[in-house]
Image (cartoon, grey):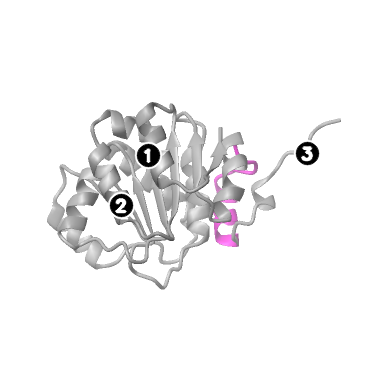
Amino acid sequence: MQDSVIQFSDLSLNDSILSALDGMGFVSPTPIQAAAIPHLLEGADALGKAQTGTGKTAAFSLPLLNKLDLNQRKPQAIVLAPTRELAIQVAAEMKNLGKNIKGLKVLEIYGGASIVDQMRALSRGAHIIVGTPGRVKDLLNRDRLNLGEVHTFILDEADEMLKMGFVDDVTWILEKAPDTAQRILFSATMPPMVKTIVDRYLRDPARVD
């Protein structure tokens, strides 16, 4: 007897997200998405072990897009990525998944681009910030980025981020996270440094492998 395959429509996602997925031809989630999305929709902290190419960006993006308050112009989520290329890629995928969410603003911030332009964009409001740790820290230090309304922190490719020497920036940013915020960490491997961050900053996380 064949197992019934879970579909996106079985998950508690809103219609604008389901219509975007439908338009892209996505019917069934990948294993990481099927395992992670229900936990993330409940607001649990989560630790996901996933390689690039498994659909992990959508695994954390869909629950996040599902719970945004579009009337709130201050950032509600911070996604940290190790490189500007990944930040741009994650932001592009989020915009695509949220293309039917009217008024959605996803802003990518990273070094090597004008900080003045990024400050200007922040002042116009954004729902989700996708950035590299150094630039996110810089904008926090300048009081241009406000974490008061942030309900979700996501560390993408955490092992790469720490390997590249961002451990101090990442922990500094996490120290500033509101206590109530959901914390989600995705990593392909679990070196000791990642385990330390998980133990210190995630509260009884759901583990998705």
Q: CA distance from mark 3 to mark 1?
A: 37 Å
Q: Is residue 22 magenta?
A: yes
Q: Which mark is first along the chain, 1 or 3?
A: 3
Q: Position of residue 181 (x, y in %)?
A: 42, 58
**Quadrant showing the C terminus:** top right
**SS category of the residue bearing label 1:** helix
Which disc, if any, is residue 109? none
Q: Which portion, as a residue range, is magenta?
A: 15-30
- Residue highlighted by disc 3: 4
- Residue type at mark 2? Glu
- Residue highlighted by disc 2: 175
- Residue highlighted by disc 1: 197
* Vertical relation: 81 (above or below) 97: above
Question: Mark 2, residues whose alpha carbon is within 10 Å: few (<14), some, or many (≥20)?
Answer: few
Q: Which mark is first along the chain, 3 or 2?
A: 3
**SS category of the residue bearing label 3:** loop
